Image (tube, rainbow, N blue to C red):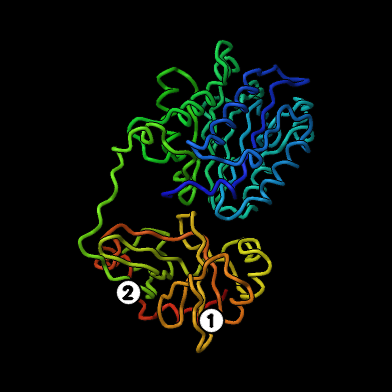
Amino acid sequence: MTHLSDPRRSRVVLVGSSTYDNFPAIPAVTNNLTALRDVLIDPQRWGLDPDACRVVHNPETPRDVHAVMRRAAAEVDVSGLLLLYFAGHGVIDPDTGVLHLAVGQTMPDSAYSSAVPFDWVRRLVQGSRSAHRVVVLDCCYAGRAIPGLGAADDAALATQVEIDRSCVLVAASGNRVALAPPDEPLTAFTGVLVELLRDGVDGGPQLLDLGTLHDEIRRVQRARGRPIPELRARNGGDRIPLVVNARRAARPADAPARPPHPESPRADSSLVGRVLRGGATTTDPELDGAVAILAHSPIEGAIGVRLDRPASRSPAHVLGDELAASLHVPAVLDGGPVRDVVLLLAVLRPGATPPAGWRVLGRELVVMPLDADPAQAESAVAAAYLFVGYLGWRPQQLEGELATGDLVDTGTDLATWLDNPSQGW
């Protein structure tokens, strides 16, 4: 991603338990919540609306956490970021090995009924409209006495909390003192995270993404002899940016304006609107199917979408009930690993003129804005196709893949392919 998620359409839930009935207290968690909220609503870093940042401090029951997270997951928009954070004790069910997040009334011997199952979090995140989804767990594992739950299991735990098309950052398990040093205001992991979000990263990108933050936290924690975090990301989730890098923002000269190209490439490349397919030599699973090219420039690269990979989300979930109904969208398709874009393609009715703001791809095929007027869309559109995510190629990369046979031209244009009723939406 090259831009921050829309702060007006994003939702953040910060959950932290500093006191418990049956576990040791973690006083620093209170400061974690305040510090994280402050840096996320800072207009110089991201500028999240304070009302969109819900803080749940010392929840007593799992329902207290679930209610707030469920509301945030329902409210977040497709162009916004859903970020769920938890700090406190993590409990592993000894019978199932499933991670639970401890709240005030959690019982050590019955986590399954008194703590928040991580599966609740997973389901809420997967069911949200947002294409940018982040979970951060700063867990202090009270259940380290369980046989086999040692440092070697950290990677397995991180795998357990993977969420498709998202990014999960987990503070590796360790003893309570190492994770919450008594002489520091924040827990060890969140302390470094807040410091990086607030103060920036030398030599880092203009926007601090999860991958950069993870690498830097690992470096700092290793130097301090502290637990090393784990990152699990799918479909480009590690490229989701959270804030402006303060070190770059303070020195604008580090990011000079991009000079204009002396010659503007034509937008109507011969590859635009073509349907390609992975060749016999390809090893990239993203190319193992039908791919449509939507934009192409020898100077700036190309953008395309997978055409044959249905996603689990419903059209109404992405577009809203009214627009989805007016367009009769047959399915949501997984367009590719870069998850920060939703594309709505449409075939115009014969003789229809595309309204202002609709980008023409050729042969009555257009890209529609997601806020198109439903009545206008219904009168102009014969068929519509919805893609979450896209494929990207660097300059000359697409040409190289065609030359090596990793991609081959099917001889079909996109309008013809979409018009074929045998595609099996």
Q: Secondary structure at mark 1?
A: helix
Residue under the image location 44 percent in, 66 percent down? 305
Which residue is more in the foreground, 49 or 23? 49
Residue 422 badge: 1
Rate crowding at label 1 as few (under 14), some (14 to 19) or many (20 or more) other CA atoms within 10 Å: few
Q: Compared to 196, does 264 lie above or below?
A: below
Left or right of 391 on screen, residue 400:
left
Residue under the image location 79 percent in, 26 percent down? 105
Residue 94 visible in this rendered orientation of the protein: no
Rate crowding at label 2 as few (under 14), some (14 to 19) or many (20 or more) other CA atoms within 10 Å: some
- Residue type at tag 2: Asp
Left or right of 261 on screen, residue 328:
right
Q: Position of residue 60 (x, y in %)?
A: 78, 29
Q: Are marks 2 and 1 in contact (CB under 8 Å)?
A: no
Q: Position of residue 386 (x, y in %)?
A: 54, 68
Q: Compared to 274, does 335 lie above or below?
A: above
To which residue does mark 2 refer? Answer: 268
Residue under the image location 66 percent in, 40 percent down? 51
Q: Position of residue 4 (x, y in %)?
A: 48, 46
